[in-house]
Amino acid sequence: MTTTRSALAATIDPAAEAALDELLLSMADDEFVIGFSDSEWTGIAPILEEDIAMSSLAQDELGHARALYELLAEVRGDGQSADTIAYDREPAEYRHARLLDHGRGDWAMTIARRYLYDAADGIRLEGLATSSFAPLRELVDKIRREERYHVMHATTWLDRLARYPGEPRDRLIASLDELAPDAATVFTPLDDEALLVEAGVLAEPMTALEARWRATITPVFVGLDLPMPPAGNLDGGRSTHGDQFRWLWGEFTSVRRSDPGAIW
């Protein structure tokens, strides 16, 4: 954070500025990481239509990430570009949810992770739909229009795999079991998030948003007889990352590291 506040940061309560920075960075990193991870399905998805669908979803997520990084860069006002924030950090400095650390895996793993994330992201975006911070509110309005299709896609595939007996259902359940400890990490509490709620930037604290997420997914899981993710330990939910993410980081930063002047 700079000592001289940017013009955009000056529109919010100074006490909430650091918390806003953390919120924008966590959202941008979520979209960035899942976008790059899902782009790996291009050319190898189960059917041709899914090659196209996953490429489109990944492109949407990376577009959302870019818009959020650009907003963050403007809020910081320290001369850093969106590219710098996105690519010029070490793996430990990323603040995406640990749910997204899990590798691409098979198709069932990708669908399980995407459903859990998209449902959670939808609730988080609802919590920002009336944000007092106008640039974020306007961006969220655009993102929500695109994200509703992501939820529809993930829900359709979750239903399809869950209802197909044998290997498809077994793989889905195994994936959900593996993801379960990290399923709620999208709602890892932010430092000083109470200041965001007080300032009207965020409608509710993350614990309340998590409860709404569980209320949303419970009928789906019960209807499909799938194991609900338990309440997990969110400690380090956005700061502890494993080897699978380090590998992905190596992939998406490879061009940047070989040519620091490259842009995305």
Image: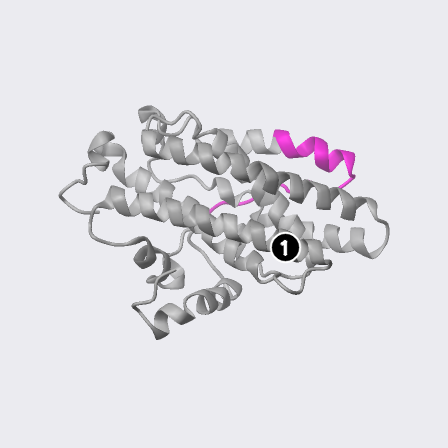
| 17 versus 73 height, above or below | above
Mark 1 residue type? Ile
Task: Residue at 45%, 65% (x, y): give it.
Answer: 252
In the figure, is residue 176 to the left or right of 193?
A: right
- Residue 91 image-quadrant placement: bottom left
Q: Is residue 7 magenta?
A: no
Residue 79 image offset from top left, x and y in percent? 20, 52
Which residue is tagged 1? Answer: 52
Residue 83 image offset from top left, x and y in percent? 33, 57
Give the farthest residue toward the bottom.
258
SS of the residue at dot 1?
helix
| 62 versus 11 height, above or below | below
Report the coloring of the rendering. Answer: one colour
Quadrant (top left/top right/bottom left/bottom right) for the C terminus = bottom left
Q: Is residue 216 magenta?
A: yes
Q: Which residues are magenta?
A: 215-237
Task: Answer whether residue 206 is visible to the viewer in this image.
Answer: no
Residues 58 and 169: in front is: 58
| 54 versus 105 height, above or below | above
In the figure, is residue 34 to the left or right of 169?
A: left
Residues 200 and 133: in front is: 133
Residue 26 image offset from top left, x and y in percent? 41, 46
Residues 64 and 226: in front is: 64
Task: Residue at 26%, 42% (x, y): give it.
Answer: 75
- Majority SS type along the magenta span: loop
Q: How many marks?
A: 1
Task: Answer whether residue 57 is visible to the viewer in this image.
Answer: yes
